[in-house]
Amino acid sequence: MTSETDRRPAEERFRAVFSHLGAVTAYARRRGSHDADAIAAEAMSIAWRRLAEVPRDDPLPWLYATARNLLHAEWRAERRHAAAELPELSVPASELRGLDPQLDRALRSLGPADREALLLVAWEDLAPAQAARAVGIKPTAFRVRLLRARRRLRAALEEDRRPAPLVQIDVEGT
Amino acid sequence: MTDHTLNRLRTANPFPAGTAVDADALFDAIVVAPPDRRLARARRRSPRPVLVLAAAVLVFALLASGAYAISGWLGGSIGGPTVRAEYADAQKQLTMPPGYTWPALHWPANSVTSPGGGGAFAVSLDQDAWECYWVDSIHSGDVAAQQKAHAALDDLMQNHIVIAPAGAPENYAPPGATGTPLLAFADDGGYAYKERMYREAAAGRPQLLEESCRANGPASHG
């Protein structure tokens, strides 16, 4: 049985974690969840049950990582895909909604790891060190990934702006 | 990414942060469940090292007493005369703080311990004495004495106290411990706790040191 002296400090600590509910909900929504509120609520419930694992100084990356796992589960259930076929770190590109078409195409052209790196920094407003914790890699590795993702996104946007090349049809024998 | 591209991506953020749910109700619903038990264990563990050390000494004494009957079969143990000889040798290598004297060793006639036990006993007593000397010097404002006590305890920690390997038996004796009195701490954080105690005392926070002196020091400090 849990005593009141055990519960009160735990609740105080959890309250700081719970203050990120809105950010986690937005994260789930931006990644295309059909029930972002439920994803965020479940992430918070897991945080309460495993509060000892949640970093006291900066819980947000831990919450995003948990929410991402829940998003993968949601996506699996909806698509009935095998786990092995899932993107590694981000929900499918097709779930990115509400973007201008050119940016949407450019983001979809990226790999899931590159896309997640960009979005954690640009949309979730995480510092690279925080984003590294959210995806479970070292900060140095994350910076390299982010740099690569930036270049690829820029290249994809530039490519999208170019007019489509004329198609030259080689006809055998001419 | 250039600022332009980054800004474009940021501007395209499709949803602001926020939630439509009743946050207070959700909070209350979540915390109805029991909290993570590991939090309570972590809180309860923090003040324990001194108690664990005292309990370990008590258990050690009981086991040593009970083991006397079979000690002759197993070997590797020493009785009163050897323990007293080790204790006397250790006093030549260790220094008691000013005003402190080595207490007489009353070793029960039917008790045994591991080789080196007499030296370990001396190191433990010496450490307790220097801790209390430090406490006294803090209370009297004698800075030189405080520094002397800190240096003596650092020397004990570095040269006469070791951490037993994880899983070592209760009668663990440091290998090659011939001549130098050594005290083995169990691998349970007790050593680090002492280090922290001395660090805090040197920084003007002697509460842990005072607690240790009250618990382990000579009777006059109890």
Image (cartoon, rainbow, N blue to C red):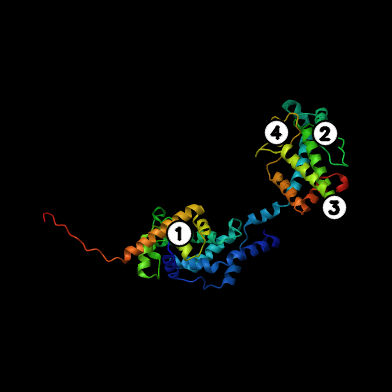
Marks 2 and 4 in Cβ contact (< 8 Å): no
Q: Is residue A99 left or right of residue B136?
A: left
**Dot 1, crowdedness within 10 Å: few (<14), some or many (≥20)?**
many
Q: Secondary structure at mark 4?
A: loop
Please tell me whether mark 3 or mark 1 is closer to you in this view: 3
- Give residue B4's position: percent from left, percent from top: 42, 67
Q: CA distance from mark 3 to mark 2?
A: 27 Å
Q: Which residue is mark 2?
A: B91
Residue at 73 percent across and 26 percent down: it is B73
In the picture, the disc for residue A117 is 1
Chain to which the residue tagged by mark 3 belongs: B
Q: Residue furthest left?
A: A173
Marks 1 and 4 in Cβ contact (< 8 Å): no
Label 1 is placed on what type of residue?
A: Ala
Q: Secondary structure at mark 1?
A: helix
Q: Secondary structure at mark 2?
A: helix
Please tell me whether mark 4 or mark 3 is closer to you in this view: 3
Q: Which residue is mark 3?
A: B139
Q: CA distance from mark 3 to mark 1?
A: 57 Å
Chain to which the residue tagged by mark 1 belongs: A
Please tell me whether mark 1 or mark 4 is closer to you in this view: 1
Chain to which the residue tagged by mark 2 belongs: B
Label 2 is placed on what type of residue?
A: Gln
